């Protein structure tokens, strides 16, 4: 009987170690699943020390955006208050949006840090077919994770479903949105617009400016960057010369820079010069502290599978001269319809489509995170909020197809809690039994005897 008790005790602890190892592996698996699905056409905004990502298209085959089930209402964010490695970003999921959302823009109010979703396509979630939401603007309060629809005075109804635009917000809380189309990719009738709409978020009053003689052509899929001087700089994209019915698309030359003065509401055109920069769509732009606009990524305007070159370029907004940073273009990740934000000297790039891996019937999507130190123009492998540069490394080459398994997380955590409860209970019984029977003493080299 003594040998049996000793054998049982040793077997229990051996099994306990094995099962504990399984739990550790299970929790490691669960932890690595807490990441977003690959996506593109999402929008992002930096709110304090959190970088938020809203919506996006999860489908690799739905080029027409006519399957609502693939347009997500998810909200994810990265906490930039602590250091992390780009291979394992600290993803956090916030409350979802009331609508599925893509091809739009999020603007952060400088007054109260509210996020305004302006333009883009808004889908009623959990529907098999396309059902567009009628609300023109949604507002997100990140402090309490609350979505609301504001009452807007004088809203221009033609702005509904306006996409292919990039609104910007100034220091007074005014949002400026130029041009765009109402294309849903599957509708037969498409309208394009050459107007400037302004939403004053302090009074929730909407206005549409009258077209002037120097208003630029209709622009789509461009980038818009607000300078400290109050000038909005529009770079790249498509242009259409006739308003109303959808006309012939042409690329916008990277040396043809349209600007809008938010102080006197006037347009002008700057003629840029410098390095050879190819036209593009689906690119991003960030403004550095010294007034340079850094553009990243994109494809040639009429083929989303061919990358634009060079992949990274810099525009000096004082001289309107283009230059190409001394950075290996070969090692640069290739993305379009991605997100980019500047935090200190870090340009943080996430998600998007991978042109070189896509085809006319398939879009290769990314869930990776890349960080470019724009001070030294090097890719870094780790984020450190307390320093401008980190250890240099090649971009993260992890798989672009990751799973966001909320179900697995729930099952994994639940199973782990149950197993730990069982172990605690069995351990307690064993401990109690051992203390009640002083003859049960563990000895080395015990054989299986009764």
Image: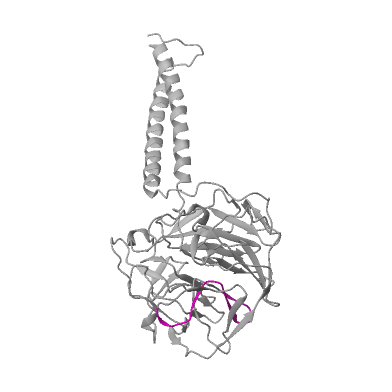
Residue 156 vs 305, above or below: the answer is: below
Q: With 371 as the anchor, is 158 left or right in this view?
A: left
Quadrant showing the C terminus: top left
- Colouring style: one colour
> Magenta stretch containing residue 240, yes or no?
yes
Q: With 376 as the anchor, is 419 left or right in this view?
A: left
Residue 272 vs 40, above or below: the answer is: below
Image point (44%, 33%), residue name? 22
Image point (57%, 64%), residue name? 341
Q: What stretch is highlighted in magenta?
A: 225-245
**In the figure, residue 247 lies in which quadrant?**
bottom left
**In the figure, residue 261 lies in which quadrant?**
bottom right
Query: What is the x, y in percent for residue 5?
Result: 40, 16
| Depth order, front residue of 232/113 | 232
> Magenta stretch containing residue 310, yes or no?
no
Query: What is the x, y in percent for residue 200?
Result: 47, 83
Residue 189 vs 368, above or below: the answer is: below
Image point (41%, 33%), residue name? 424
Residue 376 vs 438, above or below: the answer is: below
């Amino acid at each position: 009987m003594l040998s049996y008790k000793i054998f049982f005790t040793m077997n229990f602890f051996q099994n306990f170690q094995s099962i504990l190892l399984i739990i550790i592996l299970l929790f490691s698996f669960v932890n690595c699943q807490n990441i977003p699905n690959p996506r593109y056409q999402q929008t992002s905004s930096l709110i304090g020390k959190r970088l938020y990502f809203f919506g996006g298209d999860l489908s690799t085959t739905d080029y027409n955006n006519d399957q609502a089930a693939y347009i997500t209402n998810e909200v994810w964010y990265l906490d930039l208050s602590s250091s992390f490695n780009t291979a394992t970003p600290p993803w956090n999921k916030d409350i979802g949006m009331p609508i599925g959302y893509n091809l739009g823009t999020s603007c952060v109010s400088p007054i109260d840090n509210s996020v305004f979703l302006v333009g883009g396509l808004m889908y009623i979630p959990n529907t098999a077919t396309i059902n567009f939401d009628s609300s023109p603007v949604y507002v997100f309060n990140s402090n309490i994770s609350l979505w609301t629809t504001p009452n807007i005075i004088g809203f221009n109804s033609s702005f509904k479903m306006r996409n292919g635009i990039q609104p910007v917000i100034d220091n007074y809380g005014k949002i400026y949105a130029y041009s765009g189309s109402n294309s849903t990719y599957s509708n037969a009738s498409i309208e394009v617009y050459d107007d400037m709409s302004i939403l004053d978020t302090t009074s929730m009053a909407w206005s549409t400016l009258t077209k002037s003689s120097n208003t630029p052509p209709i622009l789509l899929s461009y980038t818009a960057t607000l300078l400290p001087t109050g000038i909005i700089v529009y770079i790249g994209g498509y242009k259409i010369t006739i308003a109303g019915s959808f006309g012939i698309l042409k690329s916008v030359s990277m040396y043809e820079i349209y600007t809008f003065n938010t102080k006197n509401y006037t347009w002008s055109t700057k003629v840029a010069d410098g390095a050879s920069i190819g036209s593009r769509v689906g690119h991003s732009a960030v403004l550095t502290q010294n007034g340079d606009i850094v553009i990243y990524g994109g494809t040639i305007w009429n083929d989303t599978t061919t990358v634009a070159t060079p992949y990274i370029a810099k525009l000096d907004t004082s001289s309107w001269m283009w230059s190409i940073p001394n950075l290996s273009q070969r090692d640069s990740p290739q993305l379009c319809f991605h997100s980019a934000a500047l935090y200190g000297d870090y340009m943080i790039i996430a998600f998007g489509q991978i042109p070189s891996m896509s085809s006319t019937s398939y879009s290769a999507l990314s869930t990776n995170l890349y960080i470019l130190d724009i001070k030294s123009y090097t890719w870094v492998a780790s984020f450190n909020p307390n320093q401008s540069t980190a250890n240099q490394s090649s971009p993260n080459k992890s798989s672009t197809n990751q799973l966001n398994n909320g179900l697995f997380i729930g099952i994994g955590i639940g199973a782990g809690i149950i197993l730990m409860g069982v172990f605690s209970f069995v351990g307690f019984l064993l401990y109690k039994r051992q203390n009640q029977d002083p003859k049960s003493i563990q000895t080395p080299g015990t054989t299986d005897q009764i």
